[in-house]
Image (cartoon, rainbow, N blue to C red):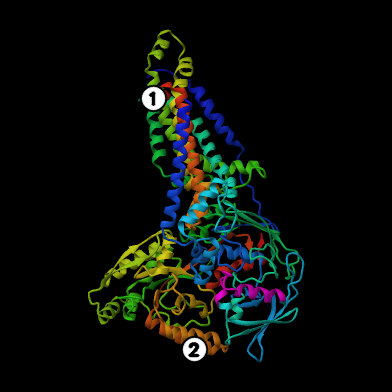
Amino acid sequence: MLRYIAYRTLVALFLVWFVVTAVFLLLHLIPGDPAELLLSQGGVAADPEAVAALREKMGLNAPLWQQYLEHMTGFLSGDFGESFRDGTPVIEQIALRLPRTLEVIAGAALLAAIFGVPLGTYAAIRADGKADALISLLASVALSTPVFVVGSVIILIFAQNLQILPAGGFAPFSQDPLEHLKLLLLPAGTVAITLWAVITRMSRASVLEVLQRDYVRTARAKGLERNRILRRHVVRNALIPVLTVLGLEMGTLIGGTVLVEFVFNWPGLSGYLVAAVDARDYPEVVGIVMTISVLFVFLNLVVDVVNALLDPRISLVKS
Amino acid sequence: MTTGFNRRGFLATTGAVAGGLAFLGPRKLMAQEGGTLRFALSTFPPTFDAWTSGGTAAGTIKLMMHRGLVSYGSDGMLRGELAESWDVDDEGAWVFKLRDATWHDGSPVTAEDVAWTVSEVQKPDSAAYMQGQFARITTVETPDDKTVRMVTAEPLAVLPGWFAHYHMPILKKGEAPDTKIGSGPFMLDKVDRGVSISLKAYDGYYKEGLPKLAGIEATVYADENLRVAALEAGDVDLAEYVPWQAMAQIDENENLRLDGVDGPFMYLTFNGSRAPFDNPLVRRAVAHAIKREDIVQAAFYGRGGALEHLPITEQSEFFNPDLANSWNYDPEKAMALLAEAGYPDGFDCVMLATAQYGMHQSTAEVCQAYLSMVGINATLDLPEWATRVKKGNEGQFDLAVMGTTADNNDPDGLGNVLDGSLPANFSRSYGLETPEISELFAKGRATFDSEERKAIYKQLEEVAIETTPIAGLAWRSQGYGMKASVTGFTNLPGQLTFYSGITLEETVLG
């Protein structure tokens, strides 16, 4: 088992290095000069001398390999460099913004699980009935509606028409906890809708499968009460694959929150990536991508290890 | 499947969650007189460097914190700020007399501060927006604490206007370009990068009784629809960059008010370094081939106007009514010009724009449709903005859609767009020499008499219409949306729209 974990960790580290290097090279391949962009905000003409001076200051005149080497050695010592736009250390911005993104994802996962598991289970036990059809239809709609459409509709209903929630923005929890939660609700709810559809479908399929197992039939034959069978034998067993999917989805959601953060003005990490790419702020982009890929790879690793622990066949094969 | 799942239990679980939402009450109204104005910014300033071009949202923040020697009043006329008066002396130098103003740390604003600011901006590596212009100031003298005398290489009628620019505030001697210390009506209080900027009133501001607000909370709403939603939901009191598609709904909302002016404009630039756009006849053919009203409809929901001459607004004293429709829509004339230029059957070319901003793409699409009707088959190249800038700077296009605003309402402010003697830049045509226009700009700058200047710029416009270094397309309305109860905030006329932040000192929350 230890060898398996060590092997998976090494693969994970290699993946992170590969992603960061690829992003670094791709960023420098695509056109767009950060100095020029910074000095020509609003479509004004930038003075070439000022652009040249700023390029020098940003270290953009150094050969690419030297810039790469500086980035990589910086990472190893925990230094992610400084933002081109205002000179603040990138690590500070990441430390500030990552928890906010994780908060949206965790909130979404919680909402999705609370609504998804019971509804999926209900659909399974009423399979082929009206309720099942309705829940399946809702899940299909939720899955196929783009997240910015869901976000815009939610803003229209709750902020513009009902005026019970703010349209977007951010208030630190330490300053105004209630406002913070109110502001969190819409973005987390929006992310939750897609996740809810996935969880519901997964729960339905999983419960349906378990319901047909021999031990459930045996339990029924023994005359056990229906709800007891459901609670003790069906849902508990059906939840394992659902949890695996939830874990994997959390990883993809880190990238998936980009649009949600943009639409709701939630100042998290993924939305910030868009602004950094737009401005060709290389240190920020590389730093953020590195953080996201580390998290993604780490989550996958955890899921794999947990699966290996739950299912001895996986570790036996690998070790 | 007949296994009965307990419906009541299921409802109880989901009901508990729904009950958790009960803490949401109606949003309370917070606006009040003397209170804090909540301002929706379109983007977080990419830099707080006072003299660097950081875009218009950065300009608005600067106009809260800083002051220049002069500025513009709500009528668009130049007025004194740190300078009480200014004039040209017998030797042709500009002399500014300073008023009694103080920095946010309480110390007085002196002539030394002004002289130091000019010398810092002039440094070749200053990255200041005005660096090029300020190179023309040869010496700055400070005969006393309240007098600044600026000697220029040649006579410069437009110099005071430079000091009105929001990228040209005066800073306290020795301060860093991103200093928190200014001399404006508001002091920087707290910055949450990418999120919000809090400012509070400076009680030592040199204008009696101003500012009227206790503070400003500027929050970034990068998405234009969210900005409108925030205004409608009552989350903010004032929003900049109202998207055109939302202007009608703000107009119709009795709780809100829209203040829009035609200022920024769209135009076509050409690659003059190669055929066919090195030929002025071809460029003029393009200018006559496009029906501008369709651009105004498609890109700006009717909020703007056709621009068939140089971007000089009707309200400007430099506006020439007899030239107003010189680039009118006339496809037959366009085809005749193409034939005269040797392209009777038209030609293929590449039109650069960007897919990142809908207004650029829509403008390009309308132009493409109209150009095809006279035989010019333009293939659209729509990269994202950064690539668009790069390609524009390097001349990787035949013709390109561009949108911008001039520095101010003085025609000299159009130099950035029209003057072919300036270095290559995406906001101008590429490789297109305009010696006659460059000379007329220089002549205009050196002329002090207002009537004479009008004649010079009229001549300049005539040359421009004939040679077509750019083709004007459309004015676009630039709008601020606000609660009906907000007073004192004015959208400044024409090209000055992005200077409107100056009126925040007089803004009152009703």
- Magenta span: chief secondary structure: helix
Q: Quadrant of the C terminus of chain B?
A: bottom right
Looking at the picture, which amino acid does disc 2 mark? Ala
Tag 2, which chain?
B
User: Relative to residue A242, is residue B188 drawn left or right?
Assistant: right
Secondary structure type for disc 1: helix
Q: CA distance from mark 1 to mark 2?
A: 88 Å
Look at the image and tell me in which quarter the N terminus of chain B lies: top left
Classify 10 Å Cα crowding around label 1: few (below 14), some (14-19), many (20 and above). few
The magenta region covers B112-132
Disc 1 target residue: A317
Task: From the top left corner, tell me how far across and down residue B467 is, in percent.
Answer: 37, 82
Identified at 39% across, 38% down, the residue is A141
Is residue B136 depicted above or below B492 in this figure? Answer: below
Q: Residue furthest bottom?
A: B90
Question: Percent from the top left, x then y, of residue A90?
Answer: 57, 51
- Residue type, numbered disc 1: Val
- Residue that mark 2 sits on: B455
Towards the viewer: B298 or B353: B353
Number of numbered discs: 2
User: Which residue is found at the position 51% from the left and 68% from the top?
Assistant: A52
Residue B47 circle label: none
**x, y percentage for residue B41?**
57, 58
